[in-house]
Amino acid sequence: MTDAAYDVVGIGNAIVDIIARCDDAFLEKQGLAKGHMQLIDQAAAAALYDAVGPAVEISGGSAANTIAGVASFGGKAAYIGKVADDELGRIFAHDIKASGVSFETKPSQSDTPTARSIVLVTPDAERTMSTYLGISPELNSSEVDPDIIKKSRILYLEGYLFDAPQAKEAFRLAASVAKTAECQVALTLSDGFCVDRHRSEFLSFIKDDIDILFANESEILSLYETQSLQTAIEKISTDAKVAAITQSEKGSVIVSGSEKHEASAEPVAAVADTTGAGDLYAAGFLFGRARNMSLAQSAQLGHIAAAEIISHIGARPEASLRDLAAKHGIAFS
Amino acid sequence: MTDAAYDVVGIGNAIVDIIARCDDAFLEKQGLAKGHMQLIDQAAAAALYDAVGPAVEISGGSAANTIAGVASFGGKAAYIGKVADDELGRIFAHDIKASGVSFETKPSQSDTPTARSIVLVTPDAERTMSTYLGISPELNSSEVDPDIIKKSRILYLEGYLFDAPQAKEAFRLAASVAKTAECQVALTLSDGFCVDRHRSEFLSFIKDDIDILFANESEILSLYETQSLQTAIEKISTDAKVAAITQSEKGSVIVSGSEKHEASAEPVAAVADTTGAGDLYAAGFLFGRARNMSLAQSAQLGHIAAAEIISHIGARPEASLRDLAAKHGIAFS
């Protein structure tokens, strides 16, 4: 597909992150599982917000972070996701468009607000997220423009959307449209708890529809209900066409049938906030694949993007990923 | 006043900063004076926001940043300022209260939104601000609680409020209440252009009512319409009881009658964003004075706070200023 309008189109929960620092005792007091994402309702979000320290607001949303990363590599990118006609919705829309991403989903006119995630960063730079989804799960099939998908090289879907029945339908529709075109379908498992909630659906979706799967260790172990990473990797190498398993500072393993690559993480002087590490790894990997790079080189782009994002607060790139790739000797048109 | 409830109470424009990066060419194209603050209306703010890149939202407002800094030193602090009952207003209120500051001003119920400042940070870390004041100038005299001022050691006023007639009245009322109590009155000139708009009023206010004046070089030169810093410092040493003149990386000069101190700036490994440098210098200086420290030691606290704030994006402290002071061997109860 040489005349594709977009390298990658992403669908996900359109979220603004509210990022605050805390210590481990605060997480414990609030009953939050460190390193994970938990869904909370509006009242719980308000109560937690009251309890946290001074915060910073930065656009987030897993797939949206990835798509902003693709654009930062110089890729052509589009995003589909639901915000409300409120201040956080305007912030989300501004930031993703200002990143160079096409974003045409109309804001909802209902009273349900834009989604927000309270991201708590502990001194070890780990992030723990409590997300009130607001209007975002109300994304419906009519809002997924088939033309955008048909004009894209890769459709990228966020596992978190499995938590919302209506959004999940939109998701499945998008995947079926992609299969009628030369558009690959990529999925991230998003979170170990999320996998736990939807294990069998994820497995059949991976086997039937997914070309590229992203997962971290806890997600892939949860998917196969095993403690052995080796076992999980063997299973995913037959279940998925391509799977990229991220392992934080240990790098990533990419399997595709009998092919297996191990990629090293990029060194980072000081890790400030791990929020978005997986999202940005996906950005680099997807951009590489959309531009017909090898699995190994795509993974390297993923690690370059992940290293940039964990060096500062927030999950959107602050530096040009295209320039960073060039510094590593990776140039592209 | 040993039984004061507050070390410092501040009055100012309650603003959320929208911080984005840009290059010098963008400032020029937008007709923005680098390093200054310009007031814009709602339509201009919307147009400028559309033009800027991805942004980060962090509570700001000059006096509010200072007061958050006082609290970070472990000081007892209160803030008076006007927000709307909207998302940015809730963000502002959350952040200042979460900093440990008492903030009781009721949000407005009018449709005019909370103030926002579009802060553009150039690669040299200089910040250029375009501020839509929204509801903040509608702070009125009835919202200045005389009891809070009477219970404070220092009342801190932001020169920017001189741009709003109603707020300026509230300001003068606050100063007159302070004079009936053992509460010192401190003022920052805020901005060279702001001084230019209100020169004679500032001068008589300084002579009649002000105990501690803060100004940077461009502000003090503008106040006395001179190119000679020496001349300006001589004049302010007779006009103000205490004046602290900040000079960026060159440190600060503090004059009080015939007394004169020169204080060095704290070294910073990498300056990320100069937004809030003056505000946080004032925080350290005011906290020191409220705790009866010398002019020299108060200035050192100012430089410690300024160094923290310019090392990261945003004008609210990320580290405990109390801990930083302790690392410099300055402890207080």
Image: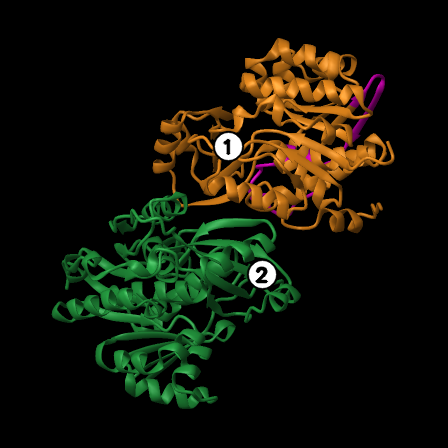
Chain colours: A orange, B green
Q: Chain of mark 1?
A: A
Mark identifier at residue A108:
1
Give the farthest residue toward the left: B180
Q: Position of residue A218 (x, y in %)?
A: 61, 21
Vertical side of A12 occupied by B125: above or below: below
Mark identifier at residue B270:
2
Q: Quadrant of the N terminus of chain A?
A: top right
**Mark 1: which amino acid?**
Ser
Residue A211 visible in the snapshot: no
- SS at mark 2? loop
- SS at mark 1? loop
Distance Cα–Cα, label 2 vs label 1: 43 Å
Q: As rendered, which of B94 and A156 lies closer to the eye?
A: A156
CB under 8 Å between discs 2 and 1: no
Q: Position of residue B224 (x, y in %)?
A: 39, 86
Give the farthest residue toward the right: A2
Q: Chain of mark 2?
A: B
Q: Position of residue B257 (x, y in %)?
A: 28, 86
Vertical side of A253 occupied by B104: above or below: below
Q: Quadrant of residue B221?
A: bottom left
**Mark 2: which amino acid?**
Ala
Q: As rendered, which of B22 and B308 lies closer to the eye?
A: B22
Residue stretch in magenta: A255-281
User: Callout 1 environment at 10 Å: few (<14), some (14 to 19), or many (20+)?
Assistant: some
Answer whether residue A273 is magenta in the image. yes
Answer whether residue A189 is magenta in the image. no
Relative placement, left or right, of A105 versus B42 is right
Q: Which residue lies at the image location 74% right of the left edge and 44% below the top edge?
A: A73
Mark identifier at residue B285:
none
Vertical side of B265 occupied by A125: above or below: above
